Image (tube, rainbow, N blue to C red):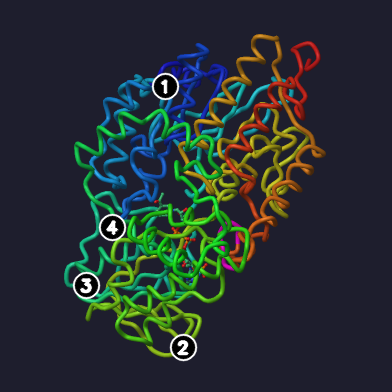
Amino acid sequence: MPDGINNHQAQGGAAPQFDAIIVGAGFSGLYQLHQLRDQLGLNVLVIEAGDDVGGTWYWNRYPGARCDSESHYYSYSFSRALQEEWRWSERYPEHGEIRRYLAHVADRFDLRRNISLNTRLTAARWDEAGNRWLIDTDTRGTLSATVFITAVGCLSAANIPQIPGLDTFKGAWHHTGRWPHQGVDFTGKRVGLIGTGSTGIQATPVIAQQAAQLTVFQRTANYSIPARNRPLTDEEWSEIQDSYEAIRERARSSTNGHPFVIFDKSALDVSPAERSRRYEEAWARGGLGFRAAFNDLLKNPAANATASDFIRAKIAEIVRDPATAAKLTPTDHPFASKRPPVDTDYFDTFNRANVTLVDIKATPIERIEARGIQTTETLHELDIIVFATGFDALTGPLLALGISGAGGHNLRQDWAAGPRSYLGLQPPHYPNMFTITGPGSPSVLTNMPVAIEQHTQWITACISYMRAHGFVRIETSEEEAGTWVAKVNAAANATLLPMANSSWYLGANVPGKPRVFMPYAGGMAHYARICDEVARDGYRGFTLSRARQVA
Ligand code: N01
């Protein structure tokens, strides 16, 4: 049993008290625990619904699941020893390897004794009189903490479309974000896969190799860049080790947490021949760094059109059937205005005899029935349906927690028209609560570990400051949140990001969700500077109170 949890409640005692309760044992929760416990000496508990650590990578075990950030920087930078002892095997880490890494981190820093696995938070309530959070759980009753920290990730609430008739389907169906741990055997099966975002694009080529027949149901055609995954050689690894600090520094001082060197020219300031050479080089290198081929691809529509056209031409080159190539060609949004997928043989997979593409904008899904998916055109008979339909991103995981704050506030009601939060770190009316990579912070627009380390370190410094100065309560105001939300909107509007109508950044993928651009697009390094200034100014925008003021 983790430290601090005892059978108080079974004996009818008060809720066990902690200095901090963290929900989620992925990248954020593990590091936040390490800092609060081992730097500040706090009594901390992490609550985790899964039966092991891993967060996103605990749940996302679908075929082909691997990170699109490169392994050597999709990792923690806070411990040089950890960095030196962990050897990544491939350019991009596969889901199992990331889980092994996070399990190693949990063991190495002896974190497990403060993690309560198989424990689901069922509600979190601010107790004004006690100036504490009361955290209801399914297995350990009610716990109490001075500080409540959400480390639930941005992409953890599965979006399963409400297609009529799903319950009548005689085969099996799975959402990629809730993949069975024992895996799914596609051998000899007729498989239908719905969704062509990063996940569907990773899963399609792998499922196609095993299934008898794969039918991909595409609503929006997507740009995708080849990953060019491969094993990392010893020579490459030793080069990485030699320049690790510089790589980390570049990642931290970038706009997106990746250590890419952005070519410092507009795509329009070079000759067509040079532009094409640069795109070819970026395509050959592969990965998300394609966006760094020029410095204005996400700002200038004309510059972006050159990249979009280049990728469209590649699709036409790779896919042999012109009608399929045309369906796969994105036309309704600029490249990278949705999160660009990174693939291994995605477009080429449509050259296989056992793979079919269905454009469900042209022939929408009407219903699911016992034998398969019925579109307006035909019945696709299937044994297995894979929902690669993404997530109720950013707000979904937080709203699922059932959080109620001060003065009768309830997060679901407060965010009915979109998330309102100061710096993406705390909503008004929720004292002593922090949201790691919450909406309004750069989060999903970055290489996540960089955003996570910045947030958790900031939160740790804030709690340390409060304790050093005798503060017991920190809260922000509607005014601060409103000003910050305006900045989040302005930052998005300075880019092409809001131009993708179907983007989950805007909540557009979930019916009924307010259309609000949720992450902060002003750049990771710039955002970190703002957070540092806020701290330096005595936590400007927050009100800090001492015990007697609170009482
Ligand atoms: O989800 P998505 P994802 N009927 O929302 C379609 C991260 N990630 O799981 O575009 C039919 O992008 C939807 O269509 P449309 C990464 O940040 C990271 O693929 O809304 N189709 C779309 O095609 C990524 O961006 C890694 O028109 C429906 C697809 O389903 C994020 O996760 C790896 C539908 C969903 O695409 C989400 O990616 C994988 C419906 N009712 C993912 N509803 C890393 O490497 C939705 N769709 C770290």
The residue nearer to you, when weighing 188 against 293, is 293
Residue type, numbered disc 1:
Asn
Region in magenta: 501-507
Residue beneath disc 1:
114
| Residue type for callout 4 | Pro
Q: Secondary structure at mark 1?
A: helix
Which is nearer the N-term, disc 1 or disc 4? 4
Seen at 53% across and 63% down, the residue is 270
Q: Residue at x 74, y 32 (%)?
A: 406
Where is residue 401 shown, x and y percent of the image? 57, 42
Of the residues shown, which amino acid type is indicated by label 2? Thr
- Between disc 1 and disc 4, the foreground one is 4
Residue 186 location, x and y as percent?
22, 66
Residue designated by label 3: 189
Q: Which x, y percent locates residue 545?
A: 76, 18
Identify residue for label 2.
376
Is label 3 within 8 A of ligand 1 (CB to nearest ligand atom)?
A: no
* Mark-to-mark CA distance, 1 and 4: 32 Å
Q: CA distance from mark 3 to mark 2?
A: 23 Å
Horizontally, residue 112 falls left or right of residue 406, namely left
Q: Earlier in the sequence, mark 3 or mark 2?
A: 3
Nearer-the-camera pick, 38 or 130: 38
Contact (Cβ within 8 Å) of mark 2 with mark 4? no
The CA span between labels 3 and 4 is 15 Å
In the image, residue 31 sits, relative to residue 154, either above or below, namely above
Residue 147 locus on image (x, y percent): 61, 24
